[in-house]
Image (cartoon, rainbow, N blue to C red):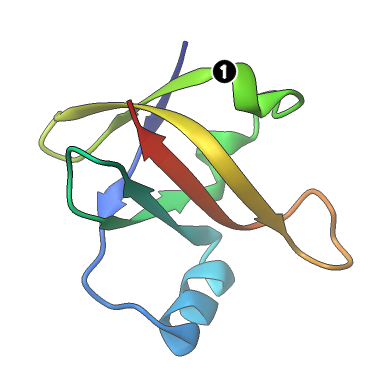
Amino acid sequence: MYNIRFFNRKNIGKKFSRKLRINNKFPAIIYGKKIKEIPITIHSNEMININLKNFFSKKFKLINEKNKIFEVKIIDIQYHPYKITKIYHIDFLFI
């Protein structure tokens, strides 16, 4: 199981997402039946060492700044259209 650190974000939208990507971060979201949607920010360096092949079958632990842990699975990953290794957005499902 992989551990990924994240930060909660209050701002949403295209303008804010572009600013995140310029700063080597990207937006993501956690959702599920038991929780309300949580928009988050992940630093791109957190995802470098993770092999995302067959990511649908892997479980991840997301840890926020207050050390609260969310056990999740990746539902969808959006990549940059030309730079295939650059992540644009990730959807996580709370287990």
Q: Residue type at mark 1?
A: Lys
Quadrant hosting residue 38: bottom left
Quadrant hosting residue 33: top left
Question: Which quadrant is the C terminus positioned in?
Answer: top left
Horizontal side, residue 64 vs residue 91: left or right = left
- Extreme residue toward the front, this view: 33
Q: Position of residue 49 (x, y in %)?
A: 64, 25
Horizontal side, residue 38 vs residue 42: left or right = left
Q: Position of residue 58 (x, y in %)?
A: 57, 18
Name above or below for residue 35 compared with residue 26.
above
Residue at point 48% right, 79% down?
A: 19
Residue at point 64% right, 49% down?
A: 77
Number of dots carrying numbers: 1
Residue at point 56% right, 60% down?
A: 24
* Mark 1 surroundings: few (<14), some (14-19) or many (≥20) residues within 10 A: some
Q: Position of residue 16 (x, y in %)?
A: 41, 82
Secondary structure, mark 1, is loop
Name above or below for residue 80 compared with residue 30.
below
Name above or below for residue 54 compared with residue 5.
above
* Residue at image mark 1: 58
- Extreme residue toward the left, this view: 66
